[in-house]
Amino acid sequence: MAELRFVSVDLEAVAPEQGAPAEGRLISGDPKFRTWNVEERDGGLYAGIWEATPGKWRIEYDEWEFCHILSGVSLIAEDGGETRTVKTGDSFILRPGFKGSWEVLETTRKEYVIRL
């Protein structure tokens, strides 16, 4: 069978993975994650939807990630830099080497594309 060249981001077609901040990274609250990874390609390319409930945790990026916020409000603080509020409709890129914290104020859902 030929490989599909058009892939819908259909949450009904993919079971979400459940998660939480990695051990030792939680700062406050009890955030829970759901991730619908709809695309995974050789070479470290991922795309899908991620959702988190309120809480705060440390983040450290080794990968490049494009994000588009679908709903909710979060604060992303860069170590030694500024704190940015991201909300519905915002798009941004986190580059390898980004370190700081992610705080979900209102349950946040984002579309993502990750390149390792």
Image (cartoon, rainbow, N blue to C red):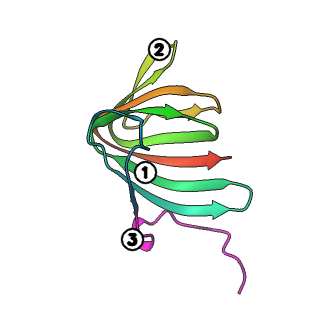
Is residue 37 shown above or below 52?
below
Is residue 112 shown above or below 17?
above
Seen from the viewer's position, the closer of residues 79 and 11 is: 79
Where is the N terminus found, in terms of image quarters? Answer: bottom right
Task: Give, as a single range, the part of the protein colored magenta.
Answer: 1-16
How many numbered discs, if any? 3
Q: Which mark is residue 50?
A: 1
Residue 64 sits in which quadrant? top right
Residue type, mark 2 in image:
Glu
Seen from the viewer's position, the closer of residues 33 and 110 is: 33
First in sequence: mark 3 or mark 2? 3
Label 3 close to label 2 by CB (< 8 Å): no
- The residue that label 3 is drawn on is 12
Front position among marks 3 and 1: 1
Task: State the residue at coordinates (51%, 60%).
Answer: 37
Is 6 contained in the magenta span?
yes
Determine whether, in the image, residue 65 is placed left or right of residue 51.
right
Task: State the residue at coordinates (44%, 44%).
Answer: 22
Q: Which mark is residue 82?
A: 2
SS of the residue under disc 2 = loop
